[in-house]
Amino acid sequence: MSRLVGLQMVNVPVSRRERALQSRRAENLHACFIFSPQIPLLLFNGFVPASSSAAAATRSPGCISLERLNRTVDRFQRTHGSPTMTRNRQDARQDARQTCAQAAAGMSGELRDRSLAPWRYSINTEDDRIPHKIAVAECLCDGCIINQREDMRYNSVPVFAPLMVMRKTPCPRDHARFMVSRDWIKVPVGCTCAAPKYAKRST
């Protein structure tokens, strides 16, 4: 075997074992060039060849396309939506300026207007939540309506109900795709009249 030393070529004795090992290395290298010419060049430079799995690794697990997100949203709303939610959103547009004094003078019509603790609806909006808009109840009075007047010896307090919603979050590495999860939230759906917490019980 010949090796370069400086600018001179010298002969170095090689054993049979070393020759066999060199031969196997040459065959393996030849096979690499036959099946994947890019692999040896990248390996020599310390890199791993890119592949479809590497591209897929840039996508966070659980990420879905916008098209699939829309299908998921439609299916979720058909399953968990209700006519009451739609009607409450419509009522919110009409209730925007209603006051406690107006409710006390009227005390007629819908339950929310006849209640001793009347309420109105407003729209709560969150872009990352599905549904984006939810009608929530707001108590009109601090006290309760007794004999068509607000009586501060009592309190109007909201009544909550659980509601399942979906949350969508852009994927960290691909904002055109989304991660979706389900969540339970408490939504004020009405108001009721209650005695204050500090009220003393009669003995």
Image (cartoon, rainbow, N blue to C red):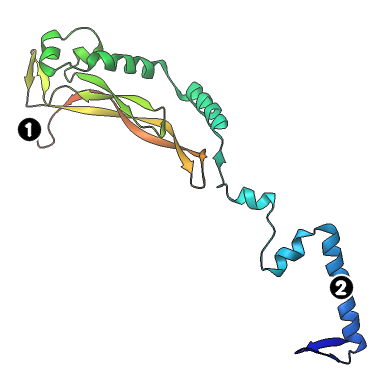
Count of all numbered marks drawn on residues in the image: 2
User: For the residue labelled by badge 2, is the local secondary structure a helix, a strand or a loop?
Assistant: helix
Amino acid type indicated by mark 2: Ala
> Residue at image x 19%, y 12%?
114
Q: Are marks 2 and 1 in contact (CB under 8 Å)?
A: no
**Quadrant of the rendered image containing residue 89:** top left
Q: Relative to the observer, which residue lies in front, 39 or 87?
A: 39
Q: Helix, strand, or loop for circle 1? A: loop
Examine the rendered structure and indicate whether residue 46 appears above or below residue 203: below
Closer to the camera, 99 or 152?
99
Q: Who's the residue at 83% across and 62% down the image?
A: 33
**Position of residue 162 measured from the top left corner of the image (x, y, whole percent):** 36, 31
Q: Residue furthest front?
A: 7
Residue carrying label 1: 202
Q: Left or right: where does residue 63 sit relative to residue 93? A: right
Neighbours of disc 2 within 10 Å: few (<14), some (14-19), many (20+): few
The residue under label 2 is 26
Kindly report the distance in space between the C-alpha atoms of the residues bearing marks 2 and 1. Answer: 100 Å
Tell me the quadrant of the picture where the N terminus can be found: bottom right
Left-right relation of 158 to 48 = left
Is residue 113 rendered to the left or right of residue 9? left
* Quadrant housing residue 21: bottom right
Residue 51 in the image: state x and y as whole percent. 69, 52
